[in-house]
Image (cartoon, grey):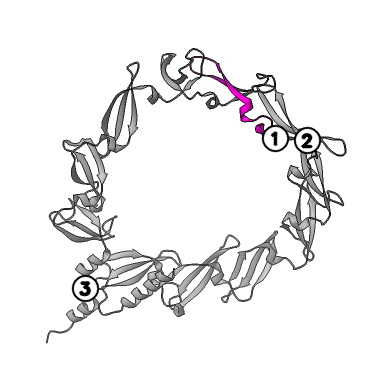
């Protein structure tokens, strides 16, 4: 940011030098405190050369700057503008931080439960801006825990002793010195652990990690449920004699080595994968699992016909009759026969896509979109094409098939179309949408080659310095 300010400052100084080629002008917008900064030539003030620049280039020295606040007429808030003092923002204006417009003497007011900075600006207009609620509260707050309707959670608030307004505080601020842990069953009869104030949950209660409430002696047990589902639980007995139960991960009840997968065929294309315990062959644990768990290491592919539609499936080669199977992408059932074909774009003949045609085992051909390089021929030529003849800068360099773009075409780096002889032209923004300084082919001035170049090249070639303009205006006697 400092470097950008320094560069802007140097350019502003240089614009007044005798050898300067351009200057910066402010163009005021239709709305108050809006506008744009332009770099223009000294001779014609923008007819020869004009380029939109960052507002910082038109920013006057700091001592000539001021700030003005525009209050939002619809409610609290507004916008702060940095302006030039001399013209009150007609020659320069830009958005600034709201704090830069903050008056010296401010007060804080609560309006409908929200806190605002309030002040009167020098011209009598109001300054109203939202801020944190803390600014509107007194230094003395009463910390209180408010129990929720469920009786198993709550929130901590600070209550202003003067206004009665509340502000949310971290739950730790309400935690008393003396607490205890208690296991409480939820609606599913699972044990949940809570930290509770010694004086009761009305003063503090918070759900905590189950480890704080677990019994000294516990074990893991699997419970088989309906529809091939089940759950591992940690169970035990608390010191008060109540049963304890919490959910646990499956691997706590069974290790990976204690389980095996079994595939049950459903139809020609798919089936169901089950996970069972080895020791009892599924009498203790019998649950559905993802098909990937039953997928064997050695897999094959088959093309099957279902309802007159071809479908590619992966299948267990060791058990084709009843083994693992599931649908997969068609490309896995294709033969080695494939052909790459270029499909030209309808709107732009120099664009297109590369299609890979694959023949399946049953003779059917499927197509896949591939990378453009797959259709690239061994020999190519380069060709310059301008999308919009009225806009020279819309041109691109294309690598095409020797017989034309209908067989292959792709955009390549512009320098590959660069001719031996080039020149520099300037495209004015008032005439061209894509404006600036460009290097073009010397023969057609942009029909065969156009590439963006440094603005200084056009300045040095086409513009006159302040000294040159001054010399030209001197009398010849």
Describe residue 145's horizontal placement relative to residue 62 as left or right.
right
Between circles 3 and 2, the one closer to the viewer is 2
Q: Quadrant of residue 78?
A: bottom right
Q: Secondary structure at mark 3?
A: loop
Q: Is residue 187 visible?
A: no
Q: CA distance from mark 3 to mark 2?
A: 91 Å
Tell me what residue is drawn at x 65 percent, y 18 percent: 281
Say the numbered circle drawn on residue 464: 3
Q: Is residue 417 placed above or below 379 in the rendered structure?
A: below
Is residue 415 a member of the stretch shown in magenta? no
Magenta region:
249-274
User: Residue 262 in magenta?
Assistant: yes
**Vertical position of residue 455 compared to residue 311: above or below:** below
Q: Nearer the viewer, residue 437 or 374?
A: 374
Q: Residues within 10 Å of mark 1 (few under 14, many from 20)?
A: some
Q: Nearer the viewer, residue 180 or 79?
A: 180
* Other-residue count near label 2 (Cα within 10 Å), few / some / many at <14 / 14–19 / ≥20: some
Residue for point 31% across, 23% down: 336
Foreground disc of the pair 3, 1: 1
Question: Considering only order in the chain, which callout, 1 or 3, is on the residue closer to the N terminus?
Answer: 1
Q: Residue at x 56, y 75 (%)?
A: 123
Upstream in sequence: badge 3 or badge 2: 2
Location of residue 294 by image quarter: top right
Task: Give the quarter of the figure containing the C terminus.
Answer: bottom left
User: What residue does disc 1 label?
Assistant: 248
Label drawn at residue 218 = 2
Q: Which residue occupies 24% across, 37% down?
A: 376
Residue 208: horizontal and vertical position, in percent?
74, 46
Would you say 300 lies left or right of 158 here?
left
């Amino acid at each position: 940011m400092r470097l950008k300010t320094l560069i802007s400052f140097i350019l502003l100084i240089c614009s007044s030098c005798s050898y300067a080629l351009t200057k910066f002008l402010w163009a005021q917008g239709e709305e108050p405190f809006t506008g744009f900064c332009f770099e223009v030539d000294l001779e014609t003030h923008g007819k020869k050369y004009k380029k939109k620049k960052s507002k910082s280039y038109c920013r006057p020295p700091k001592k000539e700057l001021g700030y003005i606040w525009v209050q939002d007429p619809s409610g609290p808030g507004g916008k702060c503008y940095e302006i030039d003092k001399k013209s009150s923002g007609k020659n320069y204006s830009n958005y600034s931080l709201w704090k830069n417009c903050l008056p010296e003497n401010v007060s804080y007011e609560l309006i409908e439960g929200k806190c605002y900075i309030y002040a009167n600006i020098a011209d009598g207009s109001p300054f109203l801006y939202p801020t944190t609620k803390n600014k509107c509260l007194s230094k003395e707050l009463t910390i209180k825990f408010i129990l929720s309707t469920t009786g198993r959670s709550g929130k901590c608030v600070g209550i202003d002793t003067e206004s009665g307004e509340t502000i949310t505080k971290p739950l730790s601020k309400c935690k008393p010195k003396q607490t205890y842990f208690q296991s409480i069953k939820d609606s599913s009869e699972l044990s949940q652990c809570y930290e509770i104030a010694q004086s009761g949950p009305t003063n503090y209660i918070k759900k905590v990690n189950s480890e704080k409430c677990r019994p000294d002696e516990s074990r893991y047990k699997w419970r088989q449920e309906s529809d091939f589902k089940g759950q591992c639980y940690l169970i035990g007995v608390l010191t008060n004699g109540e049963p304890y139960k919490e959910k646990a991960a499956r691997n706590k009840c069974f290790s990976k080595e204690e389980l095996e997968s079994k595939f049950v065929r459903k139809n020609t294309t798919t089936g169901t994968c089950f996970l069972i315990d080895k020791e009892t062959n599924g009498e203790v644990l019998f649950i559905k699992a993802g098909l990937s768990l039953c997928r064997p290491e050695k897999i094959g592919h088959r093309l099957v016909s279902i309802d007159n539609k071809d479908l590619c499936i992966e299948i267990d080669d060791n058990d084709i009759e009843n083994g693992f199977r599931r649908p997969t992408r068609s490309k896995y059932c294709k033969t080695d026969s494939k052909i790459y074909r270029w499909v030209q774009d309808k709107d732009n003949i120099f664009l297109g896509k590369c299609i890979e045609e694959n023949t399946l085992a049953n003779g059917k051909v499927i197509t896949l979109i591939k990378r453009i390089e797959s259709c690239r021929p061994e020999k190519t030529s380069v060709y310059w094409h301008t999308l919009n003849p009225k806009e020279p800068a819309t041109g691109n360099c294309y690598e095409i098939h020797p017989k034309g773009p209908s067989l292959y075409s792709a955009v390549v780096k512009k320098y590959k179309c660069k001719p031996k002889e080039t020149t520099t032209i300037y495209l004015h923004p008032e005439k061209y949408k894509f404006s600036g300084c460009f290097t073009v082919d010397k023969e057609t001035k942009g029909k065969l080659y156009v590439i963006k170049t440094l603005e200084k090249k056009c300045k040095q070639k086409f513009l006159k310095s302040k000294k040159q303009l001054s010399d030209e205006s001197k009398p010849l006697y």
